[in-house]
Image (tube, helix red, strand yellow):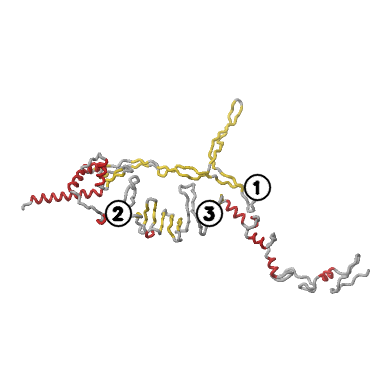
Amino acid sequence: MPAAAALAGDELLPVVQAGQTVGASVAQIRTGLLSSSHDGGGGTVHAMALADGAAGFMSGSDKAKLDGVQVSATANSSDTQLRDRATHTGTQPHTSVSGLGTMATQMASSVAISGGTATFSTLTTTGTMTTGGQLTVAANAPYDYAGYLQNTSALGISGFGMRNAAGGVAGGMAYYEAGDLLLLSIATASGAARLQSSGGAFDVMASGALAPAADNQHSIGTSLRRVSQVFAGTGTINTSDEREKEDIRLIDAPLAEALLRAFDPVTFQWRDVDHAAVVETRRAKRQKTTPREVEIAETVRAEDGRFIRVRRTVVERCPAFEAHPVHGEDGAALLGDDGEPVLHFEPVMEEVEEQIVARPAYHKANVRTHWGFVAQQVERGLCGALGLDPDDPAQRDQARLRFAGLVYDQDSDRFGLREGQFISILWASMRDLLDRVEALEAARLPA
């Protein structure tokens, strides 16, 4: 059979019969197979590399979509399925989200979730933390306080502020490294800092004065918790306003003289006092310990021709830990070079009662000699001057009511004196003496 003629490029390929040989080169066949309607027609090979967005086998916009698919991407779903996957409403392994495994591992080491409660070992925030309920600070085991809120600034200040329901600043507390503890509250007069309990309050005023929140209602110290000394530049000032007094009477001169004779001025020394230690029971958290037998010595002794090894051991209390396997970002357990799981040892804590010495025992020695009066002797002399029986409790109470210079606190069973009120007794007696001297001198002078 004759060989086929060379193709011109525009004719149809002949029907090749079985066993027939077509005389055409590979290039001629390839050129004939290319579509003349293809972009870059004329039977030429189309370029494989095109600029981004340029049209090729597909439109530029379709090509841009294809370019947006990541290498090795496995998503091949509908728009709805892809959206659910992107918003994590579906189910997919955590390894499909970059960094999710690392974040979960870090959170697992600092937060424990039980029911609806998340407990953080460390919580750091650079913004605003808002709670709809109470903010509770758990007990801090190494220290005596229940916990703390801390904000460390470049000025060496740790503290926190508080706002009221309207959002305004209500006050705050701050601690300076120099040792100053500051309380600030704009809810009190003139921005004073208030120290308050259920029984009352004291304000440190903006001027620096320490003043009770309510007038003439609170004491400094009690008969059982006294202030040792009060240092003042000009002494104390007692209110003596006539507008606040009633039933004002002159002191009877004979009574003043009777009291002057009845009260014995004395010198004395205070007794030495031994103060016992004040111990408080507090609950605290500490690391649990477990007993463990530890070998401290090993010896060999001869006995009946044999050598016997002897071990000496003691039981020690060792800190308790719980071992937890460590996982990688992909969720798989980590293994060491020996093929064993990598473990993290967490201390086991327990709550215990501790005896804390709140104030150590001390001895107070008194060596100075004091001048003054003895309250019980004053009470007896007062009863005698007023014509009352000092052995009758009811009449003793009446005497105390008639002279406020004598004080008895029933709760502590302790006497005291307001010695400033003794001045008026001396004053009335001196005036009566002056009147007598003047009368005597007048009687001696000639008419």
Q: Which residue is mark 1?
A: 337
Q: Position of residue 10 (x, y in %)?
A: 84, 74
At a point 24% along the width and 49% down the height, the residue shown is: 421
| Number of the label disc, if any, that sits on residue 380 | none
Query: Viewer-proximal residue, 415 or 299?
Result: 415
Q: Is residue 371 above or below residue 52?
A: above
Name the spot of residue 145 as percent of width and height, x first: 46, 49
The three-letter amino acid code for the residue at tag 1 is Asp
Q: Residues within 10 Å of mark 2 (few under 14, many from 20)?
A: few
Q: Earlier in the sequence, mark 2 or mark 1?
A: 2
> Label 3 to label 1, Cα distance in Å?
34 Å
Residue 376 versus residue 301 in the image, above or below: below
Mark identifier at residue 233 = 2
Mark 2 lies on a secondary structure that is: loop
Lateral position of residue 48 relative to residue 328, left or right: right
Q: Which residue is mark 3?
A: 123
Q: Residues within 10 Å of mark 3 (few under 14, many from 20)?
A: few
Identify the element where label 1 is drawn: loop
Q: Quadrant of residue 264?
A: top left
